[in-house]
Image (cartoon, helix red, strand yellow):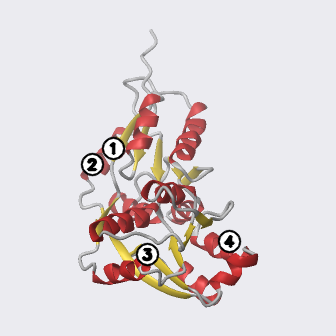
Amino acid sequence: MSRPLVPPRVLVTRRWPELMARLEAAGIEAVEVPAIETHPVIDSSALDAALGELAAARYDWLVFTSANAVESVASRCRALGVGPPPAVRIASVGPATTAAIREAWPAAAVAIQPVEDFRAAGLVEAFARAGGSTAAALAGSRVLLPVSDRARDTVETGLTALGAHVDRVVAYETAALRSGERLREALQRGLDAIVFASPSAVEAFREAAGGTGERVAVVVMGPTTAEAAQAAGMSVHAVAQPSTTEGVAEALLRMLGGRRAAPADEPR
């Protein structure tokens, strides 16, 4: 007699209610275990000063390299009762970050976003390739770059080389998973895929799980995360195109579409 089939089981390594709802609606068993946590900066004086300068129109560009940075800046702006002036030009590293910008400031326009390479290097290249008034406006301009405490200096270095004066300020802090118990439990139960949205999540997962999970198929938000997962010895089966919640969901569903669900009592 045939045994009942169970749905694919997927580990989502960040708090992601939109993706969880999308996967569950598709009949996938999604397990959410955030590999990292984000927190407001303990001392916000540098960020507050920068946002005061921004509100006073003393910056020409506001550059975002993550949705977390957007959310952190927007939250602090609300607390201070300020916001980006209409004249400031906004740059975004990719679609997910742009979506966060539009949610935070619906009237804001994004002047620069990479066409395909949604990484820090891709954002710098987008600035370098921009012509006309955009390129001219960058040279000698003041740029506010809010980042995490673990962010690399790729954008800061790249924009400085293009002639901008960049003020890099920590907008939020990240911390690795405090306990790996839920993570190990999910791995022991068996997984069909793991979803990562950032290199820091990959690093935290690797630290908590060791070599466990290396053979599980990985789906990532973008190329930078793909590089981090591959460097960690993981098997990247799909990179979301575009780098959005829907892009991740579609990439995951396509990958799982050719997989047979395991019988209910068959170990994975």
Q: Would you name the residue on which mark 1 appears?
A: 186
Query: Is residue 26 shown left or right of residue 239?
Result: left
Q: Tag 3, which secondary structure?
A: strand
Q: Quadrant of the C terminus?
A: top left
Q: Would you name the residue on which mark 2 appears?
A: 182
- Disc on res. 126: 4
Q: Residues within 10 Å of mark 2 (few under 14, many from 20)?
A: few
Foreground residue, 138 or 129?
138
Number of marks in the rendered image: 4
**How far apart are the alpha carbons under marks 2 and 1?**
6 Å
Query: Could you tell me which residue is drawn at 38 percent across and 59 percent down?
Result: 205
Query: Could you tell me which residue is drawn at 44 percent across and 8 percent down?
Result: 1
Instruction: Give the foreground label among 4 and 1.
Output: 4
Q: Residues within 10 Å of mark 3 (few under 14, many from 20)?
A: many
When the figure is inspected, residue 190 is found, relative to residue 7, above or below; the finding is below
Instruction: Give the foreground label among 2 and 3.
Output: 3
**How far apart are the alpha carbons under marks 4 and 1?**
40 Å
Is residue 208 shown to the viewer in this render?
Answer: yes
Of the two numbered discs 4 and 2 on the same chain, state the one appearing first in sequence.
4
Of the two numbered discs 1 and 3 on the same chain, state the one appearing first in sequence.
3
Q: Are marks 1 and 3 in contact (CB under 8 Å)?
A: no
Question: Which quadrant of the structure image shows residue 155?
Answer: bottom right
Q: Would you name the residue on which mark 3 appears?
A: 146
Q: Tag 1, which secondary structure?
A: helix
Foreground residue, 101 or 183?
101
When the figure is inspected, residue 258 is found, relative to residue 176, above or below; the finding is above
Q: Are marks 2 and 1 in contact (CB under 8 Å)?
A: yes
